[in-house]
Amino acid sequence: MLKEELLKVFAEHPGEFVSGEKISQKLGCSRTAIWKHIDELRKNGYQLESAPRKGYRLVSKGDGIQPHEVKVALKTNRFGSEITYFNEIESTQTVAHELSHKGVKEGHVVIANEQTAGKGRLGRKWYSKSGTSVSMSIILRPELPPQQTPQLTLLAAVAVVRAIKSNVGISCDIKWPNDILLNGKKLVGILTEMQADPDVVHSIIIGIGLNVNQDSSEFDDEIKEVATSLRIVKGRVIERAQLIAAILNELETLYDLYLEEGFKPIKSLWEANSISVGTYIYARTMREVIYGFAKGITDDGVLLVEDQQGVTHKIYSADIEI
Ligand code: BT5
């Protein structure tokens, strides 16, 4: 990757100008190609100064995530081997849909430093400001019937919880179906969307939004009572590139296990980390609110809630209050 080699050249000359001629000799490419990559680095949040006859100087890496730092920490075979990175984009989910239509490989990841129109479920908003959060969408192409895709939301939740545990040393709780909570507040949201015909899935896009380095005053009014970040709880800044790599490592391991052995082992891991089973809950669906005892999940990832009349309801989609 020319962009990464270019960054290496700047790393060898910290704070100094490097001439266009020197760079083109080192990288074996034209001055126009260098200019194009400098322009791309700027779009990725790097601050680069250029001066006639002196060349280029890296002033600051900005507050972005460095995709090459993600790659260095990966232990995967497929996930994250291709990364599309934006310093700022409306939604990584939208880009992932477009890339998926174009036929990118399974495991391709879209990452953004900031989303200006991040999406939650049912048209809700997801807030992710520059420099403090992780917004990523992963493209999967499993051979599955569409009704099994909710299992992958649960799989993703388990992967994120395990990555946070191993990378940051914090234990989080999963709230069915797609939230990860820390001390009762929302830390992570997961949005699973698919491209499918009635009986065959073409691709599944798993969007993960994770609050990493916000302090409590930085959250937007709509979410400041309900949101938390890793930094608030851990008391220090967390390296986002490492965390993204840890999530991709866990995701690939669990996904491979799922393809080999089915949902059963994932279900056990999910139940072990979930606060929404074995307790009384309110399930707010599009049509009604059901209060009852959450007995567990089915193999399709459906939540089973027994109401006070002893009737068991199958909940496919809802917001849960515990
Ligand atoms: C979700 O929806 O929780 C799914 C969020 C998925 C976001 C990722 S980021 C990468 C990818 N690209 C996207 O555009 N989206 C995905 P839902 O369960 O509907 O929850 C949405 C609700 O969570 C909102 O109505 C707010 O109340 C709350 N919320 C929004 N931003 C939040 C944040 N940063 N932290 C905590 N809560 C938030």
Image: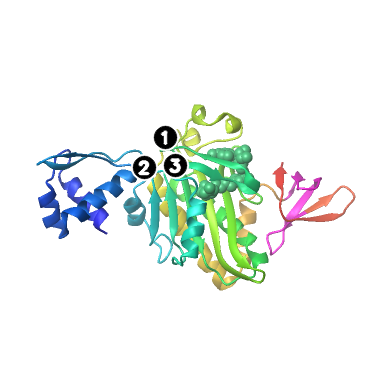
Check the picture and name the quadrant holding the N terminus. Answer: bottom left
Q: Is mark 2 within 8 Å of ligand 1?
A: no
91 relative to 305 in the view: left or right: left
Name the residue that disc number 1 marks.
236
What is the magenta range? 278-304
Q: Which residue is mark 2?
A: 64
Q: CA distance from mark 1 to mark 2?
A: 18 Å
Identity of the residue drawn at 30% across and 49% down: 40
Task: Count residues near mark 2 (Cα–Cα under 10 Å), then give few for <14, some for 14-19, many for 20+.
Answer: many
| Magenta residue check for 293 | yes
Classed neighbour count for the residue bearing mark 1: other residues with Cα under 10 Å, few (<14), some (14–19), many (≥20): few
Q: Quadrant of residue 87?
A: top left
- Circle 1 — which element? loop
Indicate the quadrant where residue 280 lies.
top right
Q: Earlier in the sequence, mark 1 or mark 3?
A: 3
The disc labelled 3 sits on which kind of residue? Answer: Glu
Q: Quadrant of ligand 1?
A: top right
**Mark 1 belongs to which amino acid?**
Arg
Is residue 108 located in the magenta-colored stretch of the structure?
A: no
What is the residue that sits farthest to the right in this orientation?
A: 309
Residue 185 visible: no
Label 2: which secondary element: loop
Residue occupying the far top of the picture: 217
Quadrant containing the C terminus in the rendered view:
top right
**In the rendered image, the vertical position of residue 315 relative to residue 252, given as above or below:** above
Name the residue tied to disc 3.
114
SS for tag 3?
loop
Query: Where residue 160 sits: x, y (%)?
Result: 52, 51
Q: How is the image coloured?
A: rainbow
Please identify, in this view, whether the residue under mark 1 or under mark 2 is nearer the observer: 2
